[in-house]
Amino acid sequence: MRSKLVVVLSLVAVMLAAIAPARAITYGQLDGNRHPNVGAMVAEWRAAGQKDLFCTGTLISPTVFVTAAHCTAYLEALGLEQIWVTFDSHFNAATATLYPGTLHTNPGYNQRQSDSGDIAVVVLDQPITHLTPARLPTAGLLDQLRAQNGLKDQTFTAVGYGALEATRSDGRPVNNTSVDRRFSTSRFNALNPGYIRLSQNNATGDSGTCYGDSGGPNFLGTSDVLAAITTTGDALCWATNVDYRLDTQSARTFLANYVTLP
């Protein structure tokens, strides 16, 4: 589910590549209606009048959709002011249900920092009342779990729209794009002050994220607790899913501007 953004505006891509990592689900399954509160941003980022998916995110209140700052910063750098969110499990631009909203990038976002602040929200114009928002973690939840059991064998469920596992094309690995919401299951790898790293090595039974999934959720086990959001990983989406923690003080400080924290 990661989302290293594939940009067709070549000049813009060269200028902005540094702020445009993103990812999609690898070795996962179609989500259907398992995670209806997980959606995707939609914008005319490739061409005017052409609505395309751009990163993943999760509804955390009737009017707040959380995603990654590197996604919203990229759209802002393109000068795009109109943004929508869709929760359709299969995206079709002609028939999609779209909810307009406003981007809010974390003002503390800086990729040069050990805690990059890679978190943003879309504040929707109107509340969504037919979906149940995901739950945010309590402060320091992942640290507490590590202290209790080392997070040994803890699983996480990633959800997103985007590229699939790599296949060979002309001898080269290629991650094919997707317009479906999918989910995957990963096991704990490592915990850092700002990030959690999860195994997505299919050889060991794990699955994970890839291009197009940035900002998407990594739920604790099979619960609706949103432990972290997808940020990046290895280039071919084979080994590691790197996710920005939502239980840290920095993440909570930003989110407190938009929602009531647990």
Image (tube, rainbow, N blue to C red):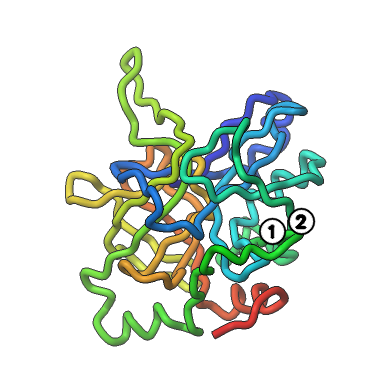
Could you say whether the residue bearing mark 1 is in a helix, strand or loop? strand
From what the image shows, is residue 209 above or below residue 5?
below
Indicate the quadrant where residue 110 lies. Answer: bottom right
Question: Which residue occupies 57% across, 46% down?
Answer: 55
Direction from residue 10 to residue 221 in the image, left or right: left
Q: Where residue 7 appears, x then y in whole percent? A: 62, 30
Check contact, mark 1 vs mark 2: CB within 8 A: yes
- Residue pointed to by mark 2: 102
Few, some or many residues within 10 Å of mark 2 (<14, 14–19, 20+): some
Identified by mark 2, the residue type is: Thr
Could you say whether the residue bearing mark 2 is in a helix, strand or loop? strand
Direction from residue 245 to residue 105 in the image, left or right: right
| Among the two numbered marks 1 and 2 on one chain, the one whose residue lies closer to the N terminus | 2
Q: Where residue 8 appears, x then y in whole percent? A: 64, 25
Identified by mark 1, the residue type is: Val
From what the image shows, is residue 168 above or below residue 6?
above
Question: Which residue occupies 50% across, 56% down?
Answer: 38
**Quarter occupied by the C terminus:** bottom right
| Labelled disc at residue 122 | 1
Indicate the quadrant where residue 34 lies. Answer: bottom left
Question: Which residue occupies 30% across, 63% down?
Answer: 189
